[in-house]
Amino acid sequence: MNVPNRLTVLRIVLTPIFMALLFWPFPFHYAAALLVFIAAALTDYFDGKIARSRDLITDLGKFLDPIADKMLTTAALLTFLSLGVLDVWAVMLVLTREFAVTSVRLMAAGRGKVVAASFAGKMKTVAQYVAIIAMIVALQWQECGTWLPLPSLCFSIPVLIAQILLWIAVVLTVISGVQYCWTLREYFTQDK
């Protein structure tokens, strides 16, 4: 359990705290959730950076890192779905991709190969993080609309922009999933 793997575990631990803060209605709870999300996202950046720079890449890290990413982003997407700011189809597409890629990874692991995140997978994660941050900021701003004397359009446009960013992230998620499945297609056809 080296430092990068501990950071990954910390991201897993921060995920339910982040989700609880999104739901728990107290003043500026979205801002608090945003801080926890950013802290969790930074662990994603630093665990990889430290692992590569200090040659601490392990099979456990390759396995846990994508799980921690999926937990964090799925928590956000499910919360947005329950808050009515994200379409169920967006969540379904992301979850389908995640199940497909995880299945391919498990098949590869069954044959002794641990599949690390690809460049497209990392870009997908960055796009999801940016879109999630944008939505949390938009939700916090929208909540400020209860006491700021501004037209309602000032509070709904940021949510719309965040929704567009989320759909861009969904498209990148699907593309990276197709890439994973194509690159690892041998595990669909090979016999043991």
Image: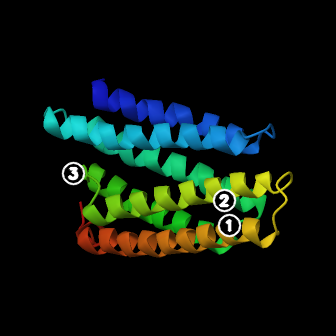
Q: Which residue carries the number 2 mark?
A: 138
What residue is rendered at 17% in x and 40% in y? 52
Q: CA distance from mark 3 to mark 2?
A: 41 Å
Callout 2 amino acid: Ala
Callout 1 amino acid: Val
Callout 3 amino acid: Lys
For marks 2 and 1, the one nearer the N-term is: 2
Between 57 and 150, the residue placed more toward the observer is: 150
**Residue 23 location, x and y as percent?**
75, 44
Q: Which residue carries the number 1 mark?
A: 159
Regarding mark 1 in the picture, which secondary structure is present there? helix
Q: Is residue 25 visible?
A: yes
Q: Residues within 10 Å of mark 3 (few under 14, many from 20)?
A: few
**Residue 40 location, x and y as percent?**
47, 39
Q: CA distance from mark 3 to mark 1?
A: 42 Å
Q: Which residue carries the number 3 mark?
A: 113
For marks 3 and 2, the one nearer the N-term is: 3
Q: CA distance from mark 2 to mark 1?
A: 5 Å
Q: Which of the 4 image quarters holds residue 139?
A: bottom right
For marks 3 and 1, the one nearer the N-term is: 3
